[in-house]
Amino acid sequence: MFHLVQSLYDSWNAREEYSVLILGLDNAGKTTLLEEVKSQYITSYKKLPPSRILPTMGQNVATIKVNKVNLKFWDVGGQDTLRELWDEYYEKAHAIVFVIDSCDKDRLVECSNALTKIVTNDLAEGLPILMLANKQDLDSPDKMELADIKEIFNPIAANLNARDSRVLPVSAITGDGVKDSIDWLHVRLIRNKANRPPKFRMLSVASTVQQFRSLFIQTQETPNENALKFIPNGATILPSPKTPTVEIDGIKDALQKSELAFKLLSINNKCISSILLGYGFMTVVKKTAREMGNGKVEEWSVLKPQIFSILTEHLTMGRPILTEKYYDYLADKLAAQKQKEVDDEAAIEEEEIEGEEDAEDEVENLIQELLTTRIQPAIQEDGGDIKFIKYDADSGTVYLKLIGACKSCSSSEVTLKNGIEEMLKYYIDEVKAVKQVIEDASSSDAQPPQQQHQEPPSKHDEYDEVPPTL
Ligand SMILES: Nc1nc2c(ncn2[C@@H]2O[C@H](COP(=O)(O)OP(=O)(O)OP(=O)(O)O)[C@@H](O)[C@H]2O)c(=O)[nH]1
Ligand SMILES: [Mg+2]
């Protein structure tokens, strides 16, 4: 089993990477094209509306996965002054996409000069060149026919000696022709592999941080020395603040729920025991000496760089955090929860009319509400979370499960008794005790998001003591 896991892990991490330059005059549509490529190849990527794409003053970088390789695109600004910078990129590039505005007849000479300059640069020798006649969706009288564009650019391409070249029609706005272009590139990059070998993508913090300077990950200690909270600035882990936290507590669980968790749980002899994913954070809990079986707990100084690297890589690649299957599962849960709320409201209205309000349900709703509005935010701050399991009306006991940093934490019992129990008892007379469920019988980690309310219910508004805090 370990070998299977290891090889799966390797196949996710060891990948050939080809760098593709997107060049062309300013206004040709390079950035718009890159946005379209990202939206077609990166699941859950939402492309920028064209109105928000500004002339590029530096570069835009994005990586997509095509079959088993990565294509890393470098969209470099095309303004006259920025073209000087293009030369800097050739040495490390594996192919060039040259974007042409098919409706810009006036700048055709400028355009062919720019291309000539590229192909005559020694450093670009042997690179496959794909010329894209962009803006095919436009119906302008200035629009050049593809045959005319080929007539101009093919002679330039003829100077390319052994390298591959092609002119293809596209529309970066509608996406037409984008897939054909990527397919062409993919085949040529592999074919040219001996000439320009790909980079082996390394999971090093230095390389990923260098590419994506906007992502910065902070760590925060938690009350549990075996748990560390990672907070990415410039990216979120789960799609919305209302998405319930997801706990993954083993390789098998990760295979169902999250590729990111799978990678993390596989490191250093599987020394991580669980991962908690929240909207703006991820908590990593490492195994105790007893859980490791060899009496040795892995040091954070060893684990931190590896976790940084995997997380940075995953986020900057735009890879989904949860598996598609699990997103579907959450969506179904959410839909079922919404339906339940509608049904409950209808039932309550009916009961109120008959004067038979269900006290038990009301207590349970209050507990859920307090957990969501008062308790969960404080617990998540510490890198953990809490799940409501059930309320036993006969004994007045609330059963809760602590996860993430709270799990196996020496202070979890104190948090539970002094913090949560006090607070629930204070607000809800019917609650007499709170107990921790260590092994949750229900296999579900996904509690549906609960309705968010700013204030507790009105019947508890008028308190005359200071309410307990966590
Ligand atoms: N109709 C149409 N408009 C496009 C298409 N591609 C780009 N545009 C428009 O062309 C303009 C320039 O697009 P950009 O993607 O910013 O061009 P660029 O090549 O990145 O320009 P620089 O960053 O200055 O080098 C924008 O108004 C885009 O909306 C296309 O396929 N069809
Ligand atoms: Mg641009």
Image: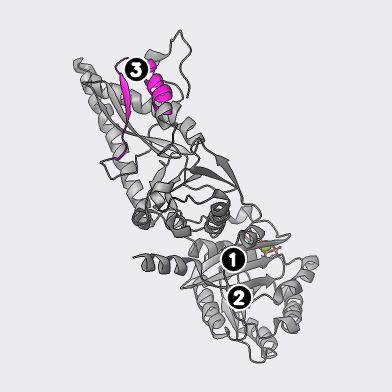
Q: Which residue is mark 1?
A: 33
Residue that badge 2 annotates: 132
Q: Is residue 266 visible?
A: no
Q: Which residues are magenta?
A: 415-440
Q: Which SS class for mark 2?
A: strand
Is disc 3 surrounded by few (<14), some (14 to 19) or many (20+) residues within 10 Å?
some
Res. 227 mark: none
Q: Is mark 3 within 8 Å of ligand 1?
A: no
Question: Which residue type does callout 3 highlight?
Answer: Ile
Instruction: Tell me, yes or no, if residue 30 can be seen here.
Output: yes
**Comparing marks 2 and 3, which lies closer to the viewer?**
3
Q: Amino acid at mark 1?
A: Leu
Ligand 1 has an atom within 8 Å of the beta carbon of the residue at disc 1: yes
- Say which residue label 3 marks: 428
Along the line of sight, which residue is nearer the eye, 69 or 271?
A: 271
Amino acid type of disc 2?
Leu
Dot 1 and dot 2 residues touching (CB under 8 Å): yes
Residue 19 higher or lower than 320, as above or below: below
Q: Earlier in the sequence, mark 1 or mark 2?
A: 1
Label 2: few (<14), some or many (≥20) within 10 Å?
A: many
Residue 193 position in % (x across, y down): 57, 83
Q: Residue 250 placed where, x, y %?
A: 37, 52
Asked if the magenta segment contains residue 426, the reply would be yes
> Residue 141 or 372: which is nearer the viewer?
372
Q: Quick check: 284 above or below 8? A: above
Q: Disc 2, ligand 1: is the CB inside 8 Å?
A: no
Q: Residue 373: within the magenta? A: no
Q: Position of residue 425 (x, y in %)?
A: 36, 18
Identify whether 449 is placed above or below 202.
above
